[in-house]
Amino acid sequence: MSLELKHYIKEALGKGADREALTRTLSRSGWSDAVIQKTLDQFVGVDAFGVPIPAPRMQAHQIARDLFIYLLVLVTLGMSAFALGGLLFDLINQYLPDPASQYWGRNINWAIAQLIVAFPVFTLLTRLVQRDVDRHPEKRESLIRKLLIYFILTLTAIVGLGDLISTLTTFLQGELTLRFTAKALVVLGISLLVFVYYLFEMRRDDSLVRRDDAVQEEAA
């Protein structure tokens, strides 16, 4: 939780501010309802009367900065995944060629160059986001962060399920080949890798938020 927000709420409630009016004021100031409610819950039993004083505002540039970084994370993640998939597809096409069709493979050099550029940027941005979240634990409940994680989880789940359906359909039609199976495994492997990583991130956020709440309740 934000120490600034906690201090403000404690001072406001101590001066008799009404909880509902305080919640509305903080919400208009840019704080998420989840963060407000979790912080308010730490002050159960405090009398709330009177008019709330002005709340500290979430800076608009911070929201824009977070949105910019998370969008770059999403873009570089997609570029890295497609580049890795394209590179592995080209290797499969070379080592398991299809004699019935002419090979129109992608340029392996292009896939390698894209991977060399995109993946380090993705790694750097991910570490930057993680350090920022560690310094500001309330950002674990950021709407932007949650939307990004759930979007990636949904997209990778759709790709993985589509890949499995396509593989099963080909198998039932009796057209399953080693070449097709290898490409299906590449798609499934990349999707699963991304899905598991961000699922772990989501569960880690939830566990750390619960831990912080428990520590604060014990200290109260």
Image: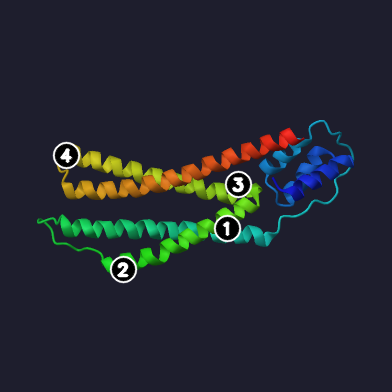
Please rate how many residues cluster around mark 3, counting C-alpha atoms within 10 Å: few if below 14, some from 14 to 19, many from 20: many
Q: Specify the farthest residue to the top.
A: 45
Q: CA distance from mark 1 to mark 3?
A: 14 Å
Please give left or right for residue 118 compared with residue 63 in the image: left
Specify which label sits upstream in the sequence, 4 or 2: 2
Please give left or right for residue 51 compared with residue 74 in the image: right
Q: Quadrant of the C terminus?
A: top right
Q: Work out whether 192 lies above or below 127.
A: above
Residue 140 numbered mark, or none: 3
Specify which label sits upstream in the sequence, 2 or 3: 2
Residue located 60% across and 52% down the image:
133
Image x and y of residue 116, in percent: 38, 66
What residue sits right under mark 2 in the picture?
Answer: 110
Q: CA distance from mark 4 to mark 3?
A: 47 Å
Tally of marks = 4
Please give left or right for residue 197 compared with residue 29 in the image: left
Q: Secondary structure at mark 3?
A: helix
Please rate how many residues cluster around mark 1, counting C-alpha atoms within 10 Å: few if below 14, some from 14 to 19, many from 20: some
Q: Nearer the viewer, mark 1 or mark 4?
A: 1
What residue sits right under mark 1 in the picture?
Answer: 67
Q: Secondary structure at mark 4?
A: loop
Q: Work out whether 170 lies above or below 93.
A: above
Specify which label sits upstream in the sequence, 4 or 3: 3
Q: CA distance from mark 2 to mark 3?
A: 36 Å
What residue sits right under mark 4 in the picture?
Answer: 173
* Circles 2 and 1: CB atoms closer than 8 Å: no
Please rate how many residues cluster around mark 2, counting C-alpha atoms within 10 Å: few if below 14, some from 14 to 19, many from 20: few
